[in-house]
Each structure stands twice: as structure tokens, then as C-alpha cells.
Image (tube, helix red, strand yellow):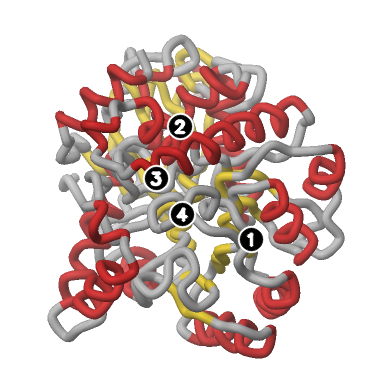
């Protein structure tokens, strides 16, 4: 078998420890997994009861642990996750950058950038992603190539440009902007016409481009605009994620029918009830995707090192405090909490999804088993792909993460997978370009 292959060849992964990814942390020893030529899980059974068809490749997995591939519910593929120059976060800097990436030269550059970043996610063990804010439709194009088996990569839910108000969070670099519900609906439909299968709204300001203290979580888009977007998306069976970094922002987004709240804030009883039962959402409930990976580095690493401005630091502190409290409250209340990292943002490398699981354990009260469950099956449910991925059930896509140690004992086992299989296509010797400086800073901050 080649390192990457376009044709799926059936194989047996023999004598492995299986961690199915349930909440209670079940482990099955000495199992053999069969993957068929359709790239699906054909059988998961004790090795002693398994007969391996002759035409199947045989992979000896002795000493290895297999779990479902990770899902990252909040990614951006236009950047690698190195610190962004704070100057580029100004309105002027954003306009310049926006002109560049939307130019004739910028398009092929973006196409190759998103392809490389998607591959980094894959090789780090992530077999499904949702993007929430792309420059254009470059990720939709990439998704089609991956689905066709032309290039390796994770299964993708692609948002295209996010939807914001003029001068709002994310505009103009990765946003379509609107000022009325009619315009907002048109923006959503424009994205849907271009083939997106996710929609992103910025309901409030954000840390990176806020120019004043307090702006990070202040409500931006009107409830009526957000509702128009949700209605359009839901008519097409598409879920809507909203960036919301204050209680008021979360409330407005949930009332508009948003399906996932990104980042989040301190929750009150009304918000918890709205998450649990949200009649205007696509499936009757809304989920929280806390993205602790995106907020914590800015407050835990020395400002001299991060290079963020005083305003960004002050806004980060407020937002991160709310995000951490909200994640913990949501978990305690038994709400659906998903796993996303906001890859591509400052200090969020594409390959570091595993860190979010560590942070959920450390800051939000998750057990390692619950964190793994959230990053696999819960994420699959939230994203509406649980019929095809998120667990090791027979018939699902063979999205497998093969590890050298048991992640239930130490989540660091997720950091360097031994083998990744996406929809039945193995990636042998997975390898990503790591940013040692960033990794060292994060290791030290979270020690
Ligand atoms: Zn984001």
C-alpha cells in the first residue's frame, strides 16, 4: 500500500486494543477490525473469532490502540496557527489582506494553503472537520476533491465566508456582510448556491479585531438577521454556528435558532434551558463548542511573547473567563458540548486538536473518556454526520485513529498517531510540520 492511495484496498487491523469512545471509557483487548473496499467498517470482533479474507491486507496492530478518528468542529484552513501580526488585525490591515487573498494571485495561494492545512489536520488524527469562516469557496472545492479521492484529507463541512455585519467580526477578510434580514438571507443563499454545507454567523465582536475594551463580546448582528440566516440554512438542512462571546450574544443567537454556539460565555438558567430545548434550531437543541484552545494561550502566555495589544489582552481575559465557565456549566448541566479549536488562529496550530481534550479535562470537569466521547460521537451528532462517522460501528466509514498508547490513561497519546485512516484510506507514517516554538510555549503554559 502507498502512503496515500486513491483506490481503497480492504485490510485487517489485527490484535489491537479498541477504545470505542463511549463516555464510560470502555476498552476491548485483542480485537481485529476489518475494513472493506467501500472504506467502511466491516467487523470489529475479538481476534480469536475473526477470519481474515485472503485478499485483505494484513496490518499487525499488536501493542496499538484504535479509536474513532477525531472530529474538529471549529477550524479555519486559511492560516497555520502562527501568531498573527497584531497590525493585520486593524481594519486597514484586514482590508489589505483581504484584497491580497481575493486577488488573481491570492486564489491559487489559498487553494494550496487550505489543502496543506487540511492534510495537517488529517495526519494529526482528525478525520472530520467543519470550517467556520473561509476566504471564499476554496474549502468547498477542496471538499469535492477529497470526496472524490483525488487528494487526501478529512471529511469536510465547509462554511465558505462567514456572515457578519459591515465592519463586524471577520469582515471583510472572511465575511459576506449584510445590514437587513433580506440581505442576510441573500448572503446565506449565496453561500448555499456555492455548495457550502455549514453556515457561520458572527453574533458578537471578537478578540482579534476588537478596537475597544468590551467590544469582543458586544452584540453585532440583529436577531432578525440571524433568524433569516437560520431559516435559509435550515430549509436546506444545514446547521448554523454562531461566534458569540457574551451572555447577551449567546442569548440572541440561540433565540434566532442557531445550532452551535462557538466560544460561549457564562450561562444562566434561561440560556441552559435554551440550549437544551431550542425550538428554532434544526434539531430541537443547540450545542456549545467552547474552543478553549483559542482563548487560553492569549491569557496564559506572557504578553511580551504573544505580542497582543493591551486591548486584546483585556478583552481576552473577559472572554476566556466566560468561555471556561460556560464550558464547565454546560458539561455539568449535561448539554451537548462539542470539541473545536479554532485552528489557524494565533497559537492554534492545525495539528493540535488533542490539546482541546486536555483542556476540557483540566478546566471544564471532563474525564478523559468524556473528552474523547465529545471529540468523536458527540461532535458527529452535533454536526449531523453520526450516521457515517464518530464511532466504530459496523457500516460506518472507517475513520480510525491508531495510537501507540491508551489515550484513556494519558491524552498525550493522541499527539503523535501511529496511523490514521480516513474513510478507509490509511495514512501511513503520519507526519506534520510542527512549530516547536509554539508547542514549547503551550506545553509550558498548560504544565
Ligand atoms: Zn473561528
Dots 4 and 1: beta carbons under 8 Å? no
For marks 4 and 1, give the one nearer the viewer: 4
Q: Does residue 252 appear left or right of residue 307 in this picture?
A: right
Tag of residue 356: 2
Q: Is mark 4 within 8 Å of ligand 1?
A: no
- Earlier in the chain: of badge 4 and badge 2, it is 4
Q: Secondary structure at mark 4?
A: loop
Give the structural element (helix, strand or loop) at label 3.
helix
Nearer the camera: disc 3 or disc 4 = 4
Q: Residues within 10 Å of mark 3 (few under 14, many from 20)?
A: many
Q: Is residue 152 visible?
A: yes
Dot 2: element: helix
Residue at image mark 1? 219
Q: Position of residue 298 (x, y in %)?
A: 37, 35
Q: Within the image, what quadrant is residue 341 found in?
A: top left
Mark 1, ligand 1, within 8 Å: the answer is no
- Name the residue carrying label 3: 312
Q: Quadrant of the C terminus?
A: top left
Tell me the number on the disc at residue 212.
Answer: 4
Vertical position of residue 1 compared to residue 116: above or below: above
Asked whether 251 or 390 is in front, the reply is 251
Q: Is residue 314 above or below residue 117?
A: above
- Where is residue 108 drawn, in percent x and y? 17, 76
Amino acid at each position: 500500500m502507498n502512503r496515500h492511495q486513491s483506490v481503497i484496498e480492504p485490510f485487517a487491523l489485527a490484535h489491537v486494543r479498541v477504545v470505542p469512545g463511549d463516555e464510560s471509557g470502555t476498552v476491548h483487548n485483542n480485537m481485529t477490525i476489518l475494513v472493506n473496499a467501500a472504506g467502511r467498517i466491516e467487523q470489529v470482533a475479538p481476534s480469536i473469532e475473526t477470519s481474515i479474507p485472503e485478499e485483505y491486507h494484513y496490518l499487525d496492530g499488536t501493542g496499538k490502540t484504535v479509536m474513532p478518528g477525531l472530529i474538529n468542529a471549529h477550524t479555519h484552513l486559511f492560516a497555520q496557527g502562527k501568531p498573527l501580526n497584531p497590525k493585520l488585525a486593524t481594519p486597514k490591515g484586514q482590508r489589505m489582506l483581504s484584497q491580497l487573498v481575493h486577488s488573481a494571485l491570492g486564489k491559487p495561494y489559498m487553494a494550496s494553503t487550505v489543502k496543506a492545512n487540511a492534510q495537517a489536520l488529517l495526519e494529526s488524527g482528525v478525520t472530520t472537520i467543519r470550517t467556520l469562516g473561509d476566504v471564499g469557496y476554496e474549502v468547498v472545492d477542496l471538499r469535492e476533491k477529497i470526496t472524490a479521492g483525488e487528494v487526501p484529507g478529512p471529511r469536510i463541512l465547509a462554511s465558505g465566508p462567514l456572515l457578519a455585519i459591515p465592519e463586524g467580526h471577520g469582515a471583510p477578510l472572511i465575511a459576506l456582510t449584510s445590514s437587513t434580514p433580506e440581505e442576510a438571507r441573500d448572503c446565506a443563499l449565496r453561500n448555499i448556491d456555492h455548495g457550502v454545507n455549514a453556515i457561520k454567523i458572527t453574533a458578537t465582536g471578537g478578540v482579534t479585531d476588537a478596537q475597544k475594551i468590551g467590544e469582543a463580546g458586544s452584540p453585532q448582528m440583529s436577531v432578525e438577521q440571524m433568524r433569516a440566516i437560520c431559516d435559509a440554512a435550515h430549509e436546506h438542512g444545514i446547521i448554523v454556528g454562531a461566534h458569540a462571546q457574551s451572555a447577551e450574544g449567546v442569548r440572541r443567537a440561540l433565540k434566532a435558532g442557531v445550532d452551535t454556539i462557538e466560544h460561549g460565555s457564562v450561562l444562566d438558567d434561561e440560556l441552559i434551558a435554551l440550549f437544551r430545548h431550542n425550538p428554532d434550531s434544526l434539531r430541537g437543541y443547540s450545542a456549545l463548542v467552547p474552543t478553549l484552545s483559542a482563548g487560553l494561550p492569549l491569557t496564559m502566555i506572557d504578553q511580551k511573547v504573544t505580542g497582543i495589544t493591551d486591548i486584546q489582552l483585556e478583552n481576552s481575559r473577559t472572554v476566556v473567563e466566560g468561555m471556561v465557565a460556560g464550558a464547565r456549566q454546560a458539561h455539568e448541566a449535561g448539554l451537548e458540548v462539542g470539541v473545536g479549536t479554532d485552528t489557524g488562529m494565533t497559537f492554534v496550530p492545525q495539528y493540535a486538536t488533542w490539546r482541546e481534550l486536555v483542556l476540557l479535562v483540566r478546566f471544564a470537569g471532563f474525564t478523559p473518556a468524556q473528552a474523547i466521547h465529545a471529540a468523536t460521537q458527540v461532535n458527529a451528532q452535533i454536526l449531523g454526520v453520526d450516521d457515517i462517522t464518530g464511532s466504530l460501528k459496523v457500516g460506518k466509514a472507517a475513520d480510525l485513529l491508531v495510537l501507540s498508547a491508551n489515550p484513556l490513561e494519558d491524552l498525550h497519546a493522541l499527539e503523535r498517531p501511529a496511523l490514521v485512516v480516513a474513510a478507509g484510506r490509511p495514512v501511513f507514517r503520519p507526519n506534520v510540520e510542527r512549530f516547536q516554538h509554539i508547542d514549547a510555549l503551550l506545553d509550558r503554559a498548560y504544565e
